[in-house]
Amino acid sequence: MPFDALRELAEAGLDLEVISDEQRAIVAGLSQEEVAMLISIQKQLLESDPEVEAHIIGGLLF
């Protein structure tokens, strides 16, 4: 099965429903390494201080 960045991120719990079609196209083009990094950052933020969690919007970081 070919790599699917959107599926991998969704399975990791990132809510991609809130991003625009343009953003979705960019995210879909991420490499496996980029997706792994986003998932790793997401996990670290969720394990950190609740104040940090407030800066996670729709599962994507800003």
Image (cartoon, helix red, strand yellow):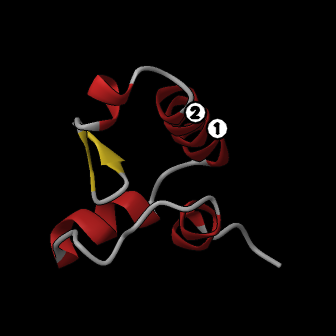
**In the image, is residue 35 above or below residue 9?**
above
Residue 37 has which mark? 2
Q: Is residue 8 above or below residue 36?
A: below
Say whether residue 45 is left or right of residue 33: left
* Quadrant of image for the N terminus: bottom right
* Residue that protrudes farthest toward the top in the picture: 49
Quadrant where the image shows the C terminus: top left
Mark 1 surroundings: few (<14), some (14-19) or many (≥20) residues within 10 A: few
On screen, residue 17 versus residue 62, left or right, reads right
Pointers 1 and 2 in contact (C-beta within 8 Å)? yes
**As shown in the figure, which amino acid type bears the numbered disc 1?**
Glu
Give percent across and percent down for residue 23. Answer: 22, 63
* Residue at the image point whose x is 58% and y is 33% from the top: 37
Mark 1–mark 2 distance (CA, rounded to whole Å): 6 Å
Extreme residue toward the right, this view? 1
Q: Position of residue 41 (x, y in %)?
A: 52, 30
Q: Mark 1 sits on what residue? A: 33
Q: How many marks?
A: 2
Of residues 33 and 61, the one nearer the viewer is 61
**Which amino acid does the dot numbered 2 rest on?**
Met
Query: Residue 54: where, in percent of width, then height?
Result: 24, 37
Image-quadrant location for residue 3: bottom right
Residue 56 vs residue 32: left or right? left
- Looking at the rendering, which quadrant does residue 13 occupy? bottom right
Residue 20 coordinates in the image, percent (x, y): 16, 73
